[in-house]
Amino acid sequence: MSHANAALTPRARLRLARLVVDEGWSVSMAAKMFQVSWPTANRWSSRYAAAGPTAMSDRSSRPHHSPAKTP
């Protein structure tokens, strides 16, 4: 599930990524159509190209480790 301020839902991310990867659209055109920045459109299309539709879900923003954590 997307957070409240997400520019794209997982379904919209998948549509954007398929246009770029499968249909041959430029990242710029897809970004303009979905009203997101070029880096955002590039991120989602790259993830789709690498891992397919399963990569369209949100990732955790929780840190993997906290080296400065107090005991």
Image (cartoon, rainbow, N blue to C red):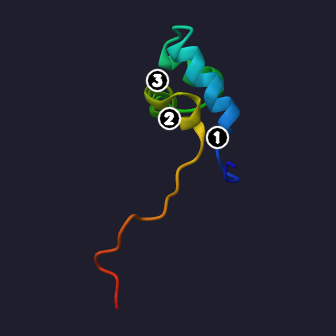
The reply to whether discs 3 and 1 touch (Cβ–Cβ < 8 Å) is: no
Q: Earlier in the sequence, mark 1 or mark 2?
A: 1
Residue 44 location, x and y as percent? 51, 32
| Residue 41, numbered circle | none
**Residue underneath mark 2:** 40
Q: Residue at x 49, y 59 (%)?
A: 61
Q: Earlier in the sequence, mark 2 or mark 3?
A: 2
Q: CA distance from mark 1 to mark 2?
A: 9 Å
Element type at marker 3? helix
- The span from disc 3 to disc 1 (Cα, nearest Å) is 20 Å
Mark 2 and mark 3: span between their CA atoms?
Answer: 14 Å
User: Which is nearer the N-term, disc 3 or disc 1?
Assistant: 1
Q: Kindly report which numbered mark, 2 or 3, lies closer to the viewer in this rendering.
A: 3
The residue carrying pointer 2 sits among few (fewer than 14), some (14 to 19) or many (20 or more) residues within 10 Å by Cα, namely: some
Residue at the extreme bottom: 71
- Going by the numbered disc 1, the residue's amino acid type is Ala
Vertical relation: 58 (above or below) 31: below
Question: Which residue position holds label 1?
Answer: 7
Work out whether residue 50 or residue 35 is closer to the camera in this orientation and state it. 50
Q: Quadrant of residue 23?
A: top right
Does dot 1 land on a helix, a strand or a loop? loop
Pick out the residue farthest to the left.
67
For discs 3 and 1, the disc positioned in front in the rendered view: 3
Task: Give above or below for 12 relative to 21.
Answer: below
Q: Answer yes or no: do the residues labelled 1 and 2 have beta carbons within 8 Å?
A: yes
- Pointer 3: what residue? 49
Image x and y of residue 54, in percent: 57, 35
- Mark 1 Cα within 10 Å, few/some/many (few <14, many 20+)? some
Q: Amino acid at mark 3?
A: Ala
Q: Residue at x 29, y 79 (%)?
A: 68
